[in-house]
Image (tube, helix red, strand yellow):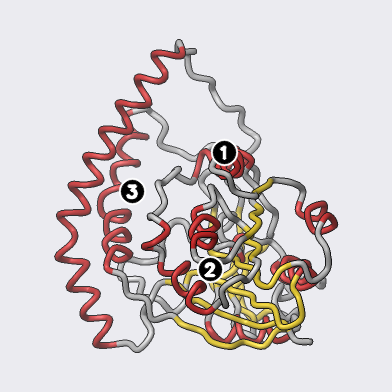
């Protein structure tokens, strides 16, 4: 692919719209907006390993699957009995719910710790090299494939969708959710919506044109979800969690990002019991702080939500797209 080419439409990118330095790896990224399809994408796009995620992304407790808007949307669209492939299945929350609703499935995830927990719950889930996983499955094996908040993490989205297309039966469904690039950003962009966590940012039109080029027909798109907890959590992250994290780093004397080539200083070893006690105390303290911050910010979030509902047609943070394989 030519330098600066859009990973969705393969056209020449437009101008650079932003630069970002990842504070964990000290890698510099340019973000460009494609002049043809409107996709915003990062350069370079190289997947990071588990160590980066352990340092940069908190291990949050997911919503109960029955409350997850993404899962409800797909299960309302999929016929009963549809055999589903869930890519990025995590611990299997969606797989469990789909099985209960009559849609048995297989899960794939890049994190062996999570798929092990899914298997312990009796679900069919695995972690392998992605290309090896594709090679192990039959053509047309699945009636549907789901990518719930996965595509934005893929360095090359066309390669991911192209591999999935082979596994779908003719007329098979593809459900994708991504952060809605047209969502409200009252306090600026969230810290997680940058590379190397997210490599792409999608609008309705960019997603539709991308899937049509990859051999799908878009059946519907929906970005109308306005769940209040999202705005509350954005406010809590910006106004409570990020300042607390900066303060904690200062107190530890660790106020600057470490360069990728700089060796990390190992902390003094703790006994297993001491490490467990320290981790438990920190988790309990953070849980209390988190609950207090979110409770205090509920009225502000509700007011912002009401304003956005009145001012905009489609302010939801999640863009849901349902497409069907051609042929």
Name the residue beneath numbered marker 2.
18
Q: Residues within 10 Å of mark 3 (few under 14, many from 20)?
A: few
Name the residue beneath numbered marker 3.
242
- SS class, disc 3: helix
Q: Taking 258 as reference, is 140 left or right?
A: right
Q: Tell me what residue is drawn at x 81 percent, y 55 percent.
A: 131
Q: Residues within 10 Å of mark 1 (few under 14, many from 20)?
A: few
Q: CA distance from mark 3 to mark 2?
A: 21 Å
N-terminal-most mark, 2 or 1: 2
Q: CA distance from mark 2 to mark 1?
A: 43 Å
**Front position among marks 3 and 1:** 1
Q: Taking 179 as reference, is 226 left or right?
A: left
Res 21 label: none
Q: Tell me what residue is drawn at x 62 percent, y 87 percent.
A: 218
Q: Tell me what residue is drawn at x 22 percent, y 81 percent.
A: 307
**Front position among marks 2 and 1:** 1
Name the residue beneath numbered marker 1.
120
Q: Residue furthest top?
A: 271
The answer to whether residue 284 is above or below residue 315 is above
The answer to whether residue 2 is above or below residue 323 is above
| Quadrant occupied by the N terminus | bottom right
N-terminal-most mark, 3 or 1: 1
Q: Taking 177 as reference, is 237 left or right?
A: left
N-terminal-most mark, 3 or 2: 2
Instruction: Specify the quadrant of the image occupied by residue 83.
Output: bottom right
Expressed as whole percent of the image width and height from the top left, the position of residue 236 reads 27, 55
Q: Tell me what residue is drawn at x 45 percent, y 10 percent.
A: 271
Q: State the residue in front, 288 or 10.
A: 288
Q: CA distance from mark 3 to mark 1?
A: 35 Å
The answer to whether residue 17 is above or below residue 85 is below
Expressed as whole percent of the image width and height from the top left, the position of residue 288 reads 22, 39
Instruction: Specify the quadrant of the image occupied by residue 189.
Output: bottom left
């Amino acid at each position: 692919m030519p330098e600066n080419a859009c990973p969705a439409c393969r056209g020449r990118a437009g101008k650079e719209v932003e630069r970002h330095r990842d504070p964990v790896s000290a890698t510099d990224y340019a973000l460009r907006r494609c002049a043809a399809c409107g996709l915003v994408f990062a350069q370079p796009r190289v997947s990071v390993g588990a160590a980066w995620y352990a340092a940069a992304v908190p291990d949050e407790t997911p919503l109960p699957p029955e409350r997850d808007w993404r899962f409800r949307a797909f299960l309302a669209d999929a016929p009963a009995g549809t055999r589903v492939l869930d890519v990025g299945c995590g611990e299997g929350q969606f797989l469990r719910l789909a099985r209960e609703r009559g849609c048995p499935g297989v899960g794939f995830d890049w994190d062996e710790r999570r798929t092990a927990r899914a298997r312990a719950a009796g679900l069919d889930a695995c972690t392998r090299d992605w290309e090896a996983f594709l090679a192990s499955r039959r053509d047309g094996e699945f009636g549907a494939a789901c990518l719930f908040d996965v595509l934005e993490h893929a360095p090359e989205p066309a390669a991911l969708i192209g591999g999935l297309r082979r596994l779908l039966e003719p007329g098979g469904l593809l459900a994708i959710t991504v952060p809605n690039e047209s969502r409200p950003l009252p306090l600026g962009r969230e810290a997680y919506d940058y590379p190397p966590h997210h490599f792409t940012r999608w609008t309705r039109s960019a997603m539709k044109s991308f899937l049509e080029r990859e051999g799908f027909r878009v059946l519907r798109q929906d970005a109308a979800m306005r769940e209040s907890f999202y705005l509350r959590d954005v406010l809590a992250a910006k106004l409570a969690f990020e300042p607390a994290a900066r303060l904690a780093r200062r107190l530890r004397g660790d106020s600057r990002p470490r360069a990728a080539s700089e060796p990390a200083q190992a902390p003094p070893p703790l006994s297993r019991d001491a490490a467990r006690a320290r981790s438990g105390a920190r988790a309990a303290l953070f849980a209390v702080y988190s609950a207090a911050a979110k409770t205090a910010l509920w009225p502000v979030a509700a007011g912002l939500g009401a304003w956005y509902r009145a001012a905009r047609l489609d302010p939801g943070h999640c863009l849901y797209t349902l497409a069907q394989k051609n042929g």
